Structures are given as structure tokens and as C-alpha cells.
Image (cartoon, rainbow, N blue to C red):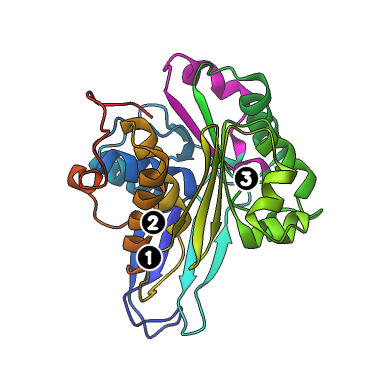
Amino acid sequence: MVMVTPQPGGRLDARSTFLLRPGGAESNVAASLAMLGHSAAWASAVGADPLGDLVVDTLRGHGVDVSLVRRDPRRPTAVYFKDPAPTGTSVYYYRTGSAASALSTGDLAAWAARHPRVTHLTGITPALSKPCHDLVRRLVHDRPLAPSLLSFDVNHRAALWPDGGGDELRALARASDVVFVGRDEAHTLWGTTTAESVRALLPEPPYLIVKDAEVEAVAFTPSGTYREPSCRVEVVDAVGAGDAFAAGWLSGLLDGLDEPERLRLGHRLAARVLRSPSDLAGLSPADRKGVGSHVADGRPRA
């Protein structure tokens, strides 16, 4: 999608000037990983329009491999608008009938040839359309990209799920290898109240990371349970912080960092986005350093 956001201090009104930037959960994660120095590709579809050009060109500029992005001449690139306010940022989405909503299992043949170490998905994509739903179910349950590690961010968007989405999102999470979920969204979806109660509901994923906003993140892993407090920051805009956290944690996984260091890196990247009006904060490979000493050689792929 393309994000339309007012310049800092503005609102979604005629008095403001606006920035155009790529947006979307999976592309945010891909861009952050690429800026950190990992090899990252984004597989999706955008319109054959100037907004599609903006998305593809900007992500390519961040180092993301966009060769798997399909250009759709019949459908537009989706758009969303941010309206920052002292009480929080409201977001308005316009993606019905978009190019990305027409993704389907027919797109998998090109993707399967890439052999990624990690495949990252979110709970937004299956809610966009029936073909998208079928695509995500195939990726998660049938594993056509195996042995790729399957990372799934629940990323619940209530407006996209007329039935609430709890059952389907739980099924997708249970079948994934790495799951990111906010404690608040888990409460909305499943009535859980603590990180431990989320784990009791989702015992299957080897890695379950429960984010509790400004309090902490808890990782349930094969080697044990780890907790790390959140960074204290002055929040400019919270949109995109969850994607940054996922990118930080996955970067730590690819680099061989231990469990607490992965959480700390996730917090650090999320804090960068929280202090920015953009979904992406300026990152570089140097942001991977100084967290721990267990950094693997090579240039991992995601």
C-alpha cells in the first residue's frame, strides 16, 4: 500500500501537507531487515500505476528484492491515510479491490523457487479476500516454501474480520513456527489476560512472542521463557512499531543472537519507529551490533 501521512504536527485536513511513503506490515518488515543488512525479498502485487511505482522504487531503494512483485494493470495500488492526534493516530484504509487483494495460490509457483530461510506473514493478508485467505492457509498449513521457518504476526484488524477472526487467526498461529501477538489483541480475540494464558492457548509454536505495549515482551521458546522490559520513549506515532519489533527479533534470529538479545533488538527498533511519524525509521547494519556477541558470519536471507 501507499501511506499518506501529514507532515509532523499536521492532521488529516485541508490545512496540512502530506508525505507519500510505502506502507503495509510485511513490506515494513522486509524493508527493516534489508536496511539492517539482511537479504530480504517482498512478494506481493501492486497496480500498474504511479503509486505502485512509488512502492516498488522505494522498497528497492531500501535494498529489498522486489522481483517477485506482480504489477496488475486492472487493479489499483491500495492507499491508507493517517490522522495523528494527541489521543492517538487514526488510520483509514482503502484497499477493497486492490492489486494485493487479488493475490492467490497461483502466485506461489514463482515464490517457491526462492528458498528463503524465513517466510513472514501477517493476519491482515488472509482477511483481504477469499483468494488471499486461501493463499495464506496454503502457505501456513501446506508449507510449499519448506524448510523455510514460518513467521506469523497476528496483527488483528477488527474491521477486516466480520466474525472477529479469532478462530482463523488462532488456527494460523498454531500452525506457525514463530508467532508475534500483542497481549491486548490476544485478549480481544481469545479472552486471554496474561502472556502465560496466551501460551496456554497456543502451545504449538516453538517460538511465541507476546508483546505487552509499554510494559514488556515475553518470549516462550524451546530453551525457556524470557522477559524484557519495553524501552521508555516519547511516542510520536505507534503505527508500524509492531512490524519494527518483528524485524528486530527476526534479525536477531538470523544472526544467531540469544533469546534476550532478540527481544532487546526488537524493542530498540520499535522505539525508533515510535519516535517517528513514519512506519519506517532510518536503520543500518550498525543497528544490529552492540546487542550481543553471538553474531553469525555471512549474510542471512529472509
Q: Which mark, by number, is residue 267?
A: 2
Contact between labelled residues 1 and 2, with CB atoms less than 8 Å apart: yes
Residue 106: x %, y % from top left: 60, 21
Closest to the observer, 217 or 155: 217
Mark pair 2, 1: CA separation: 6 Å
Residue 90: x %, y % from top left: 54, 73
Residue 69: x %, y % from top left: 42, 32
Pointer 3: what residue?
A: 123
Magenta-drawn segment: 102-126
Left of 81 or right of it: where is 298? Answer: left
Q: Residues within 10 Å of mark 1 (few under 14, many from 20)?
A: some
Residue furthest toward the right? 163
Pointer 1: what residue?
A: 231
Q: Amino acid at mark 2?
A: His
Mark pair 2, 3: CA separation: 21 Å
Camera-side mark, 2 or 3: 2
Q: Which mark, by number, is residue 204?
A: none
Is 83 inside the magenta-drawn segment? no
Q: Residue at x 69, y 37 (%)?
A: 203
Which element carries disc 3, helix, strand or loop?
loop
Q: Residue at x 68, y 32 (%)?
A: 204
14 lies above or below 248: below
Q: Amino acid at mark 3?
A: Gly
Closest to the observer, 267 or 11: 267
Q: Residues within 10 Å of mark 3 (few under 14, many from 20)?
A: many
Residue 72: x %, y % from top left: 49, 35
Q: Amino acid at mark 1?
A: Cys
Closest to the observer, 139 or 20: 139
